[in-house]
Amino acid sequence: MTPKEKKILNFTKKTHPAPIPQEGIEQVVKLMKTGHLFRYHFDAEICEETIPSDLENEPATEVAKLEDEFSCYTGHKYVIAVNSCGSALFLSLKAAGLQHNDKVLTNAFTFTAVPSSIVHAGGIPTYVECNRQYLVDIDDFKRKIQANPDAKFFIASHMRGYVSEMETLKALCDEAGIYLIEDCAHSLGAKWYDKKLGQDKLVGHHGQIACFSTQSYKLLNSGEGGFVATDDDKMAAYCILAAGSYEKLYKKHLSRPFDDKLFEAIKLSVPNFSLRMNNLTAAILRPQIPMLEERISAYNQRYKQLANILATADNIDIPSSLESVIPVCDSLQFNLINLTTKQAEKLIQDTSERGVKIQLFGHKDNARYFKNWQYSFQEMPVLKQTDEIVCFACDLKLSLLFDTNDIDLMGYIIKDTLYKIVAAENEVDYPTGLVHHFKNVDEVISKYDNWVSNYDQHHHQNGWKGLLNHVAYTSTSYLNEDDKILDIGCGTGLLGKELSSYRFKNLNGIDISEKSLQFAETFNIYKGLSKAELGKTLDFEDNSFDALVSCSVFTRQQIPLNSFEELIRILKPKGLFLLALRVEDNDFYYNRLKKYYVDGVLGEVFKTRFSVLSSCNHELVLVRKLA
Ligand SMILES: *Cc1c(COP(=O)(O)O)cnc(C)c1O
């Protein structure tokens, strides 16, 4: 554990949800003093047996205002606030005319609230497989439609904000006469490109109804809460009544069809399910709506940073959204590939001990794993594809309280843990060459030239990337993103990739192996790459670089001691030189560095021990050029 890691390890304390804006807090206090918490609260003079007909002229309550404001945001004609998204889904099915034992198609990868709402409404969930991007598998959707011609409802759940190919799904639904409900609980603010309009549009307009959540883990936080949103007059009237608007209370809605006959015609046949939102919840939510865009971009920025760090790990696959979708990423998901179940579980366990809480969707206790929805089927459904995916699918909540350092640290910990697990399993030590004796430089060159094709694979298997990750992460504490950095002995670009994953942009590399350089070139992470031999004159001006980095390059048999002269020359005054030295070679090179200390040319910033392989420990040394 690095000192920096210790210092901010408490970042798990930052995972709590977004705080309530002051304005909301004050409004809640006001409401509590008046006691007007019911969304249809009566003033004294109207608290009579007959309700006056001018209900509409009364001041609107918090909930009515919220519905109106939320409909302005999402662009739906009508919005009905309820007490949860689960309730919203339930209402939608009822409004769509679901009868007892009707089948409802829905995603096999979603949250338990979705199948639960189907069961609550009297339906029978029929699950559709997901693909590696966590989207509805279109082929399986077609198969399920064919196998269940009596299924007339589909809840498309945009699980964790992953929006499926809605245009295709919508067309398939229309063709089969299937009623489409969108579960937007976790996709508020996400956009998709509307080809007809030629512009981006908020998600939730493909189906006849869209449902939203304001539970604390979602973008809007009121603890509990939800919305039904629709453009359909009859659906809106039904939902308003069924949510708990009795007598003439529908008149108190601002966001409603204003044809009262719609309500009066069905009023007596619609049950009151008492799913209303109360004024306190609405007061908490209203000031959060104008903050949505800012929240979304803050989350997406954090997501991008962490995804970029994790992307260099061979065993991590981060699903991308469809090209037509602009997602809202308040959490990060990734698939573990080529790991055993045991290794995956160990990753969860070990990262958790280091403060990073990751969940496996396919865990035996996870409410997002279809096998745990036994209330919804008599026989376990066969969903092989989804099963294989969710058992290695990881979920990591992001928080707006995470700063750049927190995210770097999270990424570092996840990769570090993963690299250690992979190395322990493979028990591959450093390939031959560590103690190799070379007669001349040509032998060194040919060793690395011949190694290119499987160099990265070797270094992945033996956990070497743990060292590179450590060097790159350590650099974030001392170097700036735009610093001009020279990667000495860059080889195939392994260190460059790790550095660029932590946002270092101005990377340059030198190496003795032409073949390695050609390979490194293909990743487009270096601004400049050139062949150079350490110990000889380097083709750079004096004071060219803000920093030099090198990872286990200074090997006694390969690099002469006098190479430091040239490196110091091309480093800017006050510039930093970070070296990971192998312990066996430590005295050889370190003693030379100490000479520079005595001469006042270099000053030591720190020196720490880092173990990577059983045969090979490193000293991480950071020095500064003094003048
Ligand atoms: C949170 C969530 C729900 C349920 O929302 P509640 O408001 O808690 O009922 C449904 N679907 C998805 C995809 C969710 O993430």
Image (cartoon, rainbow, N blue to C red):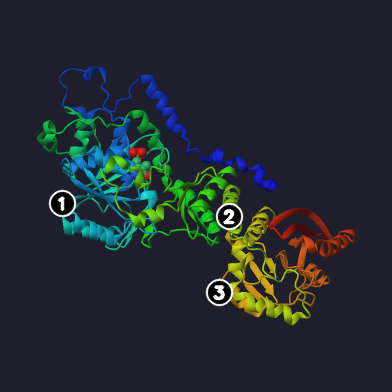
Disc 1 marks a residue whose amino acid type is Asp
Please name the residue shown 37% across and 39% down the image: 214
Disc 2 marks a residue whose amino acid type is Ile
- Residue 362, percent from left and from top: 41, 48
| Residue 505 in sight in this render | no
Residue linked to disc 2: 421
Please name the residue shown 73% across and 58% down the image: 617
At numbered mark 3, what does the secondary structure look like: helix, strand or loop? loop
Disc 3 marks a residue whose amino acid type is Thr
Structural distance between the alpha carbons of marks 3 and 1: 53 Å
**Quadrant of the rendered image holding ligand 1:** top left
Vertical placement of 253 versus 470: above or below?
above
Residue linked to disc 3: 522
Residue 150 shows which numbered tag?
1
- Residue 376, percent from left and from top: 27, 42
Structural distance between the alpha carbons of marks 1 and 2: 49 Å
For discs 1 and 2, the disc positioned in front in the rendered view: 2
